[in-house]
Image: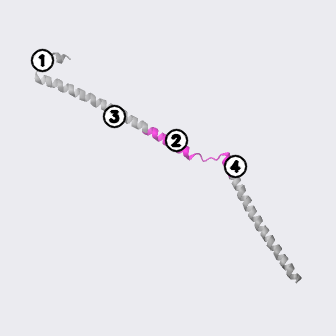
Amino acid sequence: MWEFRRWGRMGEQQKSKIITESLLGITTKSILVNQAYFRKESKMKKSLTLLLLVCLLLATVAFTGCKKQGPLEKAGKSADKAAQKTSADAQKAAADAKKAADAAKKAADDANAAKK
């Protein structure tokens, strides 16, 4: 501030030096402010990236679910096995009944042939 009081008594070189220092000071301050802003923005980008990765990890875990079977799943599987076993037993019984019917038919045909 004292420089401006003596402004009238200063030479051109001194005035030029004061103006240059003032401009450089302003420029330096603006550069420092910009660097701080970019550092803050960089930290924000890192934070957002980390948050996004955590959300993706949680979504992956939530959608894949657990491998452990619950009681309803176990009951459903046992019901499926019982139905398959019943179906297989029914098919075997049907095949046995068909064999018995064929054997009875053959016996009846043999009996009719023997009568003649």
Judged by its main secondary structure, the magenta piece is: helix
Residue 72 inside the magenta-drawn segment: yes
Give the CA separation, mark 2 to mark 4: 29 Å
The residue at which mark 2 appears reads as 58
Which residue position holds label 4? 75
Of residue 97 and residue 5, the one placed in the foreground of this image is 97
Other-residue count near label 1 (Cα within 10 Å), few / some / many at <14 / 14–19 / ≥20: few
> The disc labelled 2 sits on which kind of residue?
Leu
Q: Which residues are magenta?
A: 49-76
- In three-dimensional space, the C-alpha distance between marks 2 and 3, rounded to whole angstroms, equals 30 Å
Other residues around mark 3 within 10 Å, as few (<14) / some (14–19) / many (≥20): few
Where 43 falls versus 89 (above or below)?
Answer: above
Give the Cα separation between the discs numbered 3 and 4: 59 Å
Q: Earlier in the sequence, mark 3 or mark 1?
A: 1
Q: Which residue is mark 3?
A: 38
User: Is the residue under label 3 in contact with that under label 2 (CB below 8 Å)?
Assistant: no
x 86%, y 80%: residue = 112
Residue that extends furthest to the right in the rendered view of this protein? 115
Q: Residues within 10 Å of mark 4 (few under 14, many from 20)?
A: few
Which SS class for mark 3?
Answer: helix
Looking at numbered disc 3 in the image, what kind of residue is underneath it?
Phe
Residue 22, x across and y down, in percent: 21, 25
